[in-house]
Amino acid sequence: MSNLLPCVEIETGANPSAAVIWLHGLGADGNDFAPIVPELGLPANLAVRFVFPHAPTMPITCNNGYVMRAWYDIVHFDQISRQADVNGVKQSVQYVRDLIADQNAKGIPTSRIILAGFSQGGAIAYTAGLTHPDALAGIVCLSTYLPAEELLSKDTIANNQATPLLAAHGSHDPVVGISLGEKAKQYVVDLGVNVTWQTYPIQHSVCLPEIQLIGQFIKQQLA
């Protein structure tokens, strides 16, 4: 596939029967979350392929046009709102669909794939996960927000409305305020999505209890 993004891949066992596609935050890359795989506490008999794609590089308007890896341009942001480039969001949704199709081609059905993301990557996980045309095993959205609420409706999320979604946020987050996380969570709950919501007394990062919760979620959805 010509649009397939370069990725870091880690397999927890031979012949993986499931996959987790994990999207990094603004300015990071696919290496960012690769080290947490051993900390998830997955059982030895659950062979999972973790896919950590590298977002494309682009100038970010709110960062004075500085070029970095990003899932979409951000025109403006503050603690209560984000102005995202909606066309860029749609492009990254397509990147995710291509990544899922690639796993399908390798023998892993969509029903055995979890889509996860942190910060800007979590914004794409919300959007791409809920609007995917086939039902995923689960969606994980960390320290994030909705970049374009207009893309999510009961019609567009029909195939993943019942997909379990884990959302977590740091209560002291100075980058993506927890009010943005709560707003995103409530928006999708109002659409009928089954959300598990958890907060931690941390800033814009993840902590070990959060990683362990994600591991439990992965086990629950893929066991």
Image (cartoon, helix red, strand yellow):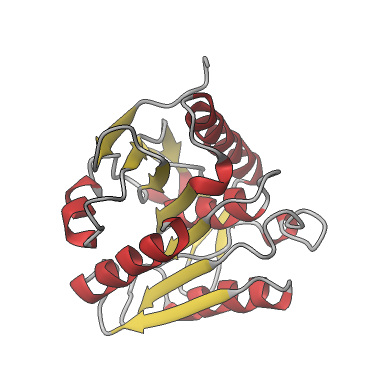
Rendering quarter of residue 216: bottom left
Rendering quarter of residue 117: bottom left
Residue at the top extreme, as displayed: 2
Percent coordinates x, y for residue 90 in the rendering: 64, 40
Name the residue rendered at 41%, 43% in the picture: 19
Q: Is residue 180 visible?
A: yes
Percent coordinates x, y for residue 89 in the rendering: 59, 44
- Would residue 180 be found to the left or right of residue 154 on screen? left
Give the total of numbered labels: 0
Name the residue rendered at 73%, 53% in the picture: 159
Residue at the front extreme, as displayed: 45
Percent coordinates x, y for residue 37 in the rendering: 22, 52
Seen from the viewer's position, the closer of residues 19 and 192 is 19
Name the residue rendered at 77%, 61% in the picture: 153
Q: Quadrant of the C terminus?
A: bottom left
Percent coordinates x, y for residue 107 in the rendering: 49, 29
